[in-house]
Amino acid sequence: MSTNLQNIRNFCILGHIDHGKSTLSDRLLEHTNTLAERDMREQVLDLMELERERGITIKATAVKLRYPAADGNLYELNLIDTPGHVDFTYEVSRSLAACEGAILIVDAAQGVEAQTLANAYLAIDSELEIIPVINKIDLPTARPDEVKRQIEEVVGIPADEALLVSAKAGLGIPAILAAIVNRVPAPTGETDAPLKALVLDSVYNNYRGVIMYTRIFDGSVAPGQKIQLMQTKRAYEVEEVGIFTPQMQPTSELLTGAVGYLIAGIREIDKAKIGDTITHHPQATLSPLPGYREIKPLVFSGLYPADTNQFHALREALDKLRLNDASFSFEPETSVALGFGFRCGFLGLLHMEIIHERLEREFGLALVRTAPSVMYRVYLKSGGYVPVDNPAYLPELQDVDRIEEPYVNIDIIVPRDYIGNAMELCQKRRGVYKRMNQLDATRVQLLYELPLSEMLTDFYPKLKSLTRGYGSLEYDIGTYKAENLVKLDVLLNGKPVDALSTILPRERAETRGKGLVSKLKELIPRQMFEIPIQAAIGNKIVARASVRPLRKNVTAKCYGGDVTRKRKLLERQKEGKKRLKQIGNVDVPQEAFTAMLATDE
Amino acid sequence: MNSPVKTASSLYIHIPFCATKCYYCAFNTYSFHKEQAKVYLQALRTEMELYLLDTAPLRTVFIGGGTPSILSAKALAQLFADLHTHFELRTDAEITVECNPGTVDEEKLKVMHNAGVNRLSFGLQAMSDDTLKQLGRIHTVTEFLHSYHLSREFGFENINIDVIFALPKQTMAAWQYTLHEVISLAPAHISAYNLVIEEATPFYEWSTAGELHLPSEDTEADMFQYTIETLTAHGYTHYEICNFARPARFARHNLVYWDNQACIGLGAGACGYVDGVRYTNIRGIAPYINALAQRNKPIADTERLTGRAEKAETLMLALRKREGISFEDYRHRFGEALDVEFAAILKKWIDLQLLERTTTHLRLTHRGLCLANEVFVELM
């Protein structure tokens, strides 16, 4: 590993979902013969089954490309593939901190979208050289000149040298490689200084422990050396360092400017936090890399085993999953209705769904998930505040001085024709209008402050449908604000079901109660007896309905011909009933616990 | 219900041919071709030979389908000749043939009568030509009446009529009309089923597409209640969930199934239960014929019924009978006490008034009849 710093380029690819990031990565790997053809498949860098299925990147990965440039030199291009979703903005920002340049990919037909902007701003904040790439130019609806103009006017970066490509058809790929060499600055750093390296991601491996993905800013690191992590202040001995091809390939050392991995016998993933600085021990660098922050969950929900006997299995699964993902939290909680389970914190809705799905898929668990909630700050009359992430635990309102809830700053891009629809939606969801920017002749950007809790109900799908799929959305965390909030409880068969409680604005509670009750009436199957459903605020019942008793469930004919088939049908029904959660003597399907998410106002 | 006997004394023969397939039907049937039927009956004869050792003198025979009465008089005569050649029938044996209105004539009735057939089962389904057309049936009400009266004239006294309720767009009044018309014919036996939408039928497709306007669950339950009350009031004994009979006219062959006793099944797609093993024959006609050409039993699937599965099936079947399951018979068959083994489940459903105890039996209550599957699911 004696590559001159001048021959290294560290870069990433940024863009809106579906604008072609993964396909472009695949093409760059092909063009530099990084992978033999037989190893090529779509989305090479997305290793997780879920990533391929959903077409998204959840974990960052890195790969080293060898590129013989026109100037006769062999360059080492490190491509860092970043997660593309707003839930993972912090991880993205750390990946960007490991780069000097970014390819900003924009769909030639769709143009600049909310995520394009958010990503571009992150890259600008990280002072990266941005190479705009207009993809899918072979589409009949492509309008590259218009998109160039948008990049200049909306994103605010020069686009006269934007590259025109079709990643799918493999057009324009050599020009991108040349631009990376010519336009992205080589890394700088002091090769003789004490080690200073960034943890840009970390994963857990059953055999090796924690594998840190790292970028070396100063100095070098080799097996056998002692290192420490500056946040957690623990010392370890380096067992192995190496690069990604994209498989891990051990090397004798990692030098300044390199991107690679480092294994140092760390057993717990939260000892190797994303954004932390690695240095030698004891002769440490004087200053850690800037930008580190603790990642805090924003969205909380309860996860309960559908079968109460599975509590310990769920705990084990959560422990194991957390080895791989330090960004979610969990602690045991008890629900009167659901029994023993865990309150889990997530970075966002997508993150929540991914964890839930991985628990069911990778650990074979059947889970009940309660509706997501934000973290409320409940200020008491007696002074001080309590954080409340579970509506069931909201203190009695007579003891409450005020409740504050978190807001987010949202950034919506819509075609002009749909401004009205989008604004009406924001207004309905308690949005506070901030600004409107004309992006170009056809599109505007709307900036609002919105309670995060409003994002947890069907805000995004509503926005999509109200704008015929054209609206795009980004958000970042804002501040806490006081709101007039109450708790809406649901009673089944006269008994309150804590897992169905929700916190919401007083003026909307009654309507919502009515909607929720009729939704539950649809979802709860008819049973042996009548089931009254009520919604209450405090002691006041605001809505009621009832599920009428089941009257008929009998197989008409049953003769010799199909006894076994009938038995198997009943056995399947029995399995199906296991997916229902028994609350008191009422069988409740999983969907009931998230019924409040569909608003249907 | 007694312990299962090793050798069967009941026989089912499947005739898998129909003129056309009704829209709700999921049975193993194919359109009728005279030449194929001839070869099929030859194969059936070979299959009979392969089961000679498995039978005791037969107490019940049921020839079902499909439409057995679609066979020609000559073919029917051949079938019964084969039956009598291969099996010994008790003098009091019940021999039933399923008939479709419009496919029986004097000649066929004569053949059946001479062959000892003493019970006919007619699929009427509805007493309205419009409804029959919507079900994909090929006959009219008039044709049914003709077939029925002709059968009576030939001395067939033990006749069952099948009717279906909860049909698409059917009103309570329409169902009441059908039921009363059937009662006025005074058949010995009436089977009244609610329509079940089976997969792989036109009705299933239409129902998933939302084009089948089925009565609500409440209407269906009301129709069922009305059926039970009306037939009982007219002197029919409600002896199984969907079956009603004049005294001494219970379907003895079907009781063999509900008692979970041995029965040989012959023919394409037929099922049998012999020596504790349930088997299902090959469904296709050509492969069925081919297997028998090699003199192999044409069996596609077998399952040895033991333990919980045998108990579950026995309970599920016996509880269909109005009298329920006898504690004594259960102990005799399984060596265990039903009310000890299933104590928790029994208590739950007795408390919910879906099951009840008599001095000798456990049975479904009146309400339990409509909700039988809720109970059966937990017995699985």
Image: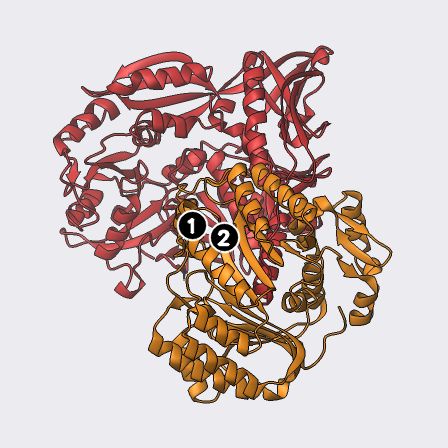
Chain colours: A red, B orange
- Please give the chain letter of the residue carrying mark 2: B
Number of the label disc, if any, that sits on residue B215: none
Q: Calculate the distance from the C-alpha at mark 2 to the C-alpha at mark 1.
A: 7 Å
Are the residues at dot 2 and dot 1 in contact (C-beta closer than 8 Å)?
yes
Front residue of this view, candidates A75 and B379: B379
- Kindly identify the amino acid type of the residue bearing the numbered disc 2: Gln
Residue beneath disc 2: B125
Q: From the viewer's perspective, tell me whether residue A577 is left or right of residue B175.
A: right
Q: Which mark is residue B132?
A: 1
Quadrant holding the N terminus of chain A: bottom left
Seen in the picture, residue B223 relative to A466 is either above or below; the reply is: below
Query: Percent from the top left, x then y, of residue B90?
Result: 67, 81
**In this view of the protein, which residue sits in the foreground, B122 or A427?**
B122
Do the dots labelled 2 and 1 sit on one chain?
yes
- Seen from this angle, which residue lies furthest front? B153
Name the residue type under label 1: Leu
Q: Is residue B83 visible?
A: yes
Answer whether residue A374 is visible to the viewer in this image: no
* Secondary-structure class at tag 2: strand
Residue A187 percent location from the top left of the image: 31, 42
User: Where is B333 relative to B172, above or below?
Assistant: below
- The x and y percentages for residue B66 are 46, 66
Lateral position of residue B2 relative to residue A70, left or right: right
